[in-house]
Amino acid sequence: MIRSKIGGIGYYVPETVVTNDDLSKVMETSDEWIQERTGIRERRYGTKHKETTTSMGARAAEVAIQRAGISKEDVDFIIFATLSPDYYFPGCGVLLQRELGITHKEAAALDIRNQCSGFLYGLSIADQFVRSGMYKNVLLVGSEMHSMGLDFSTRGRNVTVIFGDGAGAVVVQPSEKEGQGILTTKLHSDGTYAEKLAFINPGAHGGYHLDKMEEEYDFGYDYDQKYGEIFITDKMLKDGQIFPNMEGQFVFKMAVQKFPEVINEALDEVGLSTKDIDMLIPHQANLRISQFVQKRLGLTDEQVWNNIQKFGNTTAASVPIAFCEAWEAGKIKEGDLVCLAAFGSGFTWGSALIRW
Ligand code: UT7
């Protein structure tokens, strides 16, 4: 049976560095609080009017395509994962296709809305398409322009200080070498706690889900309005109900449980153990989560790659950025076992094992 491999990998982060001290000038926070709770020192923000989620994804994709030894026209399928798309619709997949100039008539594009685990879901889809023989060069991109949609008042500080902008991309191709490539991918979801980490407005919920939640939420829906002005209400704008919200401690507790679970599930399936992992690349949600997972799995510092200190949490982009950085640093060599894992909003989570 054909196995798939990562034929090329690239990443792009915007130039502008935003430190914790920079944020403490616009909201009540401090470098000490942010570093102690998250490990983050700084993050990058894209330049408005010059960069978008799509354009950053395109820059990362160009590097991945070149390293895969193919041309843009060889890309037969695009998968784009993001929670901060340029438009509500259409998705970034077709915008990226246009930006890269992929014009051949067999091309197709798919958008994924799986937040922090979007790259893992995308990798699994790419793997299935390549293994089935349907596609030969699947371009998978994870990109986020969070800085355009965060609450920069003190009200939003628990979420805003965490996130950064950036993009990562891979080209998934058939593997020619026996034993090399993606060994397995594991995906999971549980919608029970969908609103614990969510960006609810604007949306077409019209108040529907709110009745079904345990807690009393007020997301600014105007129940008296018959038509119109229910997608974005004046109240939503006035009360700042158009930003992401998170119950941080709840999410943290779920994350530290699900990361080790889904990593062990993948290892068990292919008959390997944590001792066999050469490099674990966890989604960069919080350095404290990564450290907890590392300890739980009994891994050394050399076996885990973290870069949240420099880039913050870049959601769908965090795994491919960290993966690419580790590879560029020479920490991933031929034959190494690489483990990717992510957990986030949904909740959705997943893992992948790759023999490099
Ligand atoms: O990537 C997707 C998955 N996401 C995650 O995995 C994130 C998981 N959660 C976390 O990383 C952490 O929960 C946070 C870093 C988001 C928050 O840390 P925490 O230790 O859970 O803080 P908290 O939300 O419980 O808040 C503790 C205190 C509160 O003040 P009071 O009520 O104790 O007076 C907050 O208002 O810290 C306050 N606070 C802040 N203070 C300064 C919250 N955010 C900030 C801030 N600066 N940025």
Image: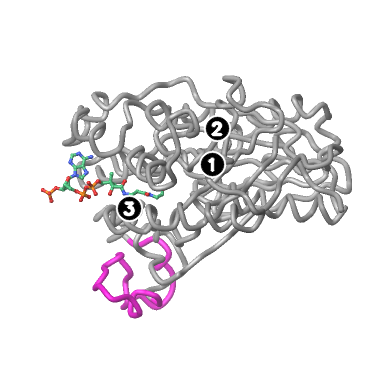
Q: Position of residue 247 (x, y in %)?
A: 28, 57
Mark 2 neighbour density, 10 Å: few (under 14) some (14–19) many (20 or more): many
Q: Which sits earlier in the primary sequence, circle 1 or circle 2?
A: 1
Quick one: SS at disc 3? helix
Mark 1 neighbour density, 10 Å: few (under 14) some (14–19) many (20 or more): few
User: Which residue is under mark 3?
Assistant: 252
Q: Position of residue 45 (x, y in %)?
A: 43, 29
Closest to the observer: 38 or 204?
38
Q: Quadrant of the C terminus?
A: top right
Type of the residue with mark 3? Phe
Vertical order, 105 against 113 (above or below): above
Q: Which residue occupies 68% across, 43% down?
A: 140
Type of the residue with mark 1? Lys
Quick one: SS at disc 1? helix
> Mark 3 to mark 2: distance in Å?
22 Å
The label shown at residue 275 is 1
The quadrant holding residue 97 is: top right
Highlighted range, magenta: 208-233
Is label 3 within 8 A of ligand 1 (CB to nearest ligand atom)? yes
> Mark 3 to mark 1: distance in Å?
25 Å
> Of circles 1 and 2, which is in front?
1
Closest to the observer: 257 or 276?
276
> Of circles 3 and 2, which is in front?
3
User: Which residue is under mark 2?
Assistant: 321
Q: Position of residue 237 (x, y in %)?
A: 31, 54
Q: Which residue occupies 59% across, 47% down?
A: 119
